Amino acid sequence: MKALLRIAWLPVLLLVLSGCIPNNPYRSEELGQNYLYSTFVEPPKHLDPAVSYSAGESVFTMQIYEPPLQYHYLERPYKLMPLTATRVPRPVYYGKDGQVLEGDPPAAEVVRAVYQVRIKPEILYQPHPCFARGKGGSYVYGDLQESQMEGIGDIEDFPHKDTRELVAADYVYQIKRLAHPKLHSPIFSTMAKYIVGLEEFGQKLSDELETIRAARQKAGGLLYNQESDERENPIWIDLDRFDLAGVRVIDRHTYEIVLQQKYPQFAYWLAMPFFAPMPREADRFFAQPPLVQRNLHLDNRPLGTGPYRLSTFLPHKEIVLVRNENFHPEYYPDTGEPQDRELGLLDDGGRRLPFVDKAIYKLEKESIPRWNKFLQGYYETSGIGTEVFDQVVQMDGEGELELSDTMRARNVRLMKAVRSSVFYFAFNMLDDEVGGYTEDKQKLRQALSIALNIEEWIQIFLNGRGLPAQDLLPPGIFGYQSGREGVNQQVYHWDEIAGKAKRKSIQVARQLLAEAGYPEGKDANGNPLVLYFDTYWTGAAAKARLDWLRKQFSRLDIDLQIRQTDYNRFRDKVQQGNFQILFWGWNADYPDPENFLFLLYGPNGKARHGGENVSNYENPEFDRLFVQVESMQNSDERLELLGRTMDIARRDAPWIWGYYPISFGLYHDWYANAKPMTMGNNALKYKKLDPQRREAQRRNWNEPIWWPVGLIIALFIAGSLPAVVAFWKREREVEAP
């Protein structure tokens, strides 16, 4: 028996130990902590606020950096409110004679728009080595030597850190960085059209850079290599040496931005990380050779005044944000939409932010492992992939999507939010067949708009995750009209009994097609109408969509031909206006109707002007109204003009009005204050956890199953028994006299 135990003890011990520990992917010291767990799919490329522009990057940047403004977390439509600013700045407009223009003057009368931003005092940056000073007041790491880098692999390793107050000059410095030729900020060209002197400032910096490079090349001779030289000895341009005419510091906590025209949407840009502060010390610190050579820079080591700071940056594994110990007082909102109180979203009103101590983001490229970990309770939230949609969501008696019984049994909650986006089928208005502005061409496009059943598309290809579009403007954007007032009467009629819009019948579409000159899908000579759909879609999913499109057009006896190509060729066709019909979409940068209406503005046509108007639509009356409404403040007058603008577009039908996508998200019941926010993306500070409940649920859902362990042990013992017995017999024989 002793021999048996000696042989069997190790596997028994290992099995027991492994069975005692649930399949927890996290460190043991994290158990029960106030830590939020989430995922990212692609490693972020840019965390520098002058460069970063993707939604995936803003998940991190918007928790660290603080522009002067933000969006109210709960109120819809989206409302700007102060973040570091004391108030939302109102522009002061000046006319040609330098006089102040009162009220909301026409854009043509405005030659200057001045924004003064006053920031709150006593806001501190996160602790950082760039601020560390010695006894004499000089920066400890102002002239960083290689000898100082011993034992330092990351910013967190520097022994000396300090902070300082946020000042107006930091915001001015960041605006100057938008023009830096080495950064290639994606918004420089846009802002150069508005901010006085920004384009000229960018040219000054380009000239300075070329002067420095020319001098170095001359000194280095024929063997000079610019790339290696600038890595060993980085070029740093002190932006404070150059004045920017349209941006200046007024006092320690006030700065001014001057625009060369009226542009009310500029306030929305002040809620983006492009206009977050950047201390000169940080810019100088990260330009030092020892850091450049170790690939430590603002693109991967951001710093700011926000509620969180970057603690770990392993972009192919894990990114960790921790609470910024210097974060200034900010409080959870106590107002919102009417239903927010019932949903518990106002329970924390007035409490200081943030609630979560640490946020741990894991790289999860595959959807199934990500989903399984959510079910195990190891992620707080999850999207709903196509492969699991039927397990998660079911349709109720009224045709609405709701959680399945399985999900409700786990107390999982469903979040729905209409995104500030629109997807549509665009007609090329330059095309001889589907383009043009005559009544027959209008009726042709209207007929096609009715025949193509967007509701069916949403159900089949989006699992119901879309809202049929009535025009350009999605919910949450000023000018959106719901109910009867918002119906596109060219495509829908209002059903009084059902209390909703219903698509007009195919018979109506056939009548319109006949009036357009194509009775039963044939022209006056009896030739069938053939139309062309250009796409870069490929694969099995593409085939299903294309087959469906052909079927929709065949309802009008129209032959739809598919022209598939690679994306580069497709893009060329779009830019040249060499197509008839295509599928396109737009995600708004900010919640203003101008950011959607410009998609149909004539001077913004893709083929002729290189803009975002892919349909190349150009209606003088629409354009006139657009110019008028784009520069107006939100008002009843603007709402009325927007309605007239929409009516023109609906009649002309340059688009088949597609859908507004709906985001479906799941979250566990220990995750509080969850409300979809498609603008701003600085929502982490509002989220709250119940770690104890989470741990209890994890243990419940991941309880070890003991019987396989017992079975394995029994089988091991049974398999080992003959050998033990034989061994025991041999020992007895040896011991016998």
Image: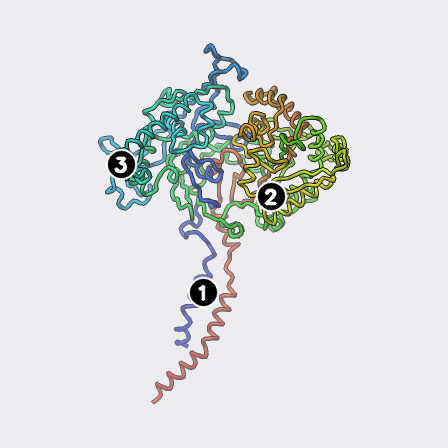
Q: CA distance from mark 2 to mark 1?
A: 56 Å
Determine contact: label 3, label 2, CB under 8 Å: no
Whether 498 is drawn above or below 259: the answer is below
Front of the two marks 1 and 3: 3
Most foreground residue, 261 or 254: 261
Q: Residue furthest front?
A: 525
Q: Residue at x 43, y 47 (%)?
A: 33
Whether residue 618 sits left or right of residue 324 in the image: it is right
Please say whether residue 163 is visible from this viewpoint: yes
Most foreground residue, 219 or 410: 219
Query: In the image, which disc is placed on residue 564?
Result: 2
Kind of residue at disc 3: Gly
Query: In the image, which disc is placed on residue 221?
Result: 3
Tally the numbered discs: 3
The numbered mark, 3 or 2, whose residue comes first in the sequence reads 3
Q: Residues within 10 Å of mark 3 (few under 14, many from 20)?
A: few
Quarter placement of the N terminus: bottom left
Whether residue 150 sits left or right of residue 308 in the image: it is left
Q: CA distance from mark 1 to mark 3?
A: 69 Å
Q: Which residue is mark 1?
A: 15
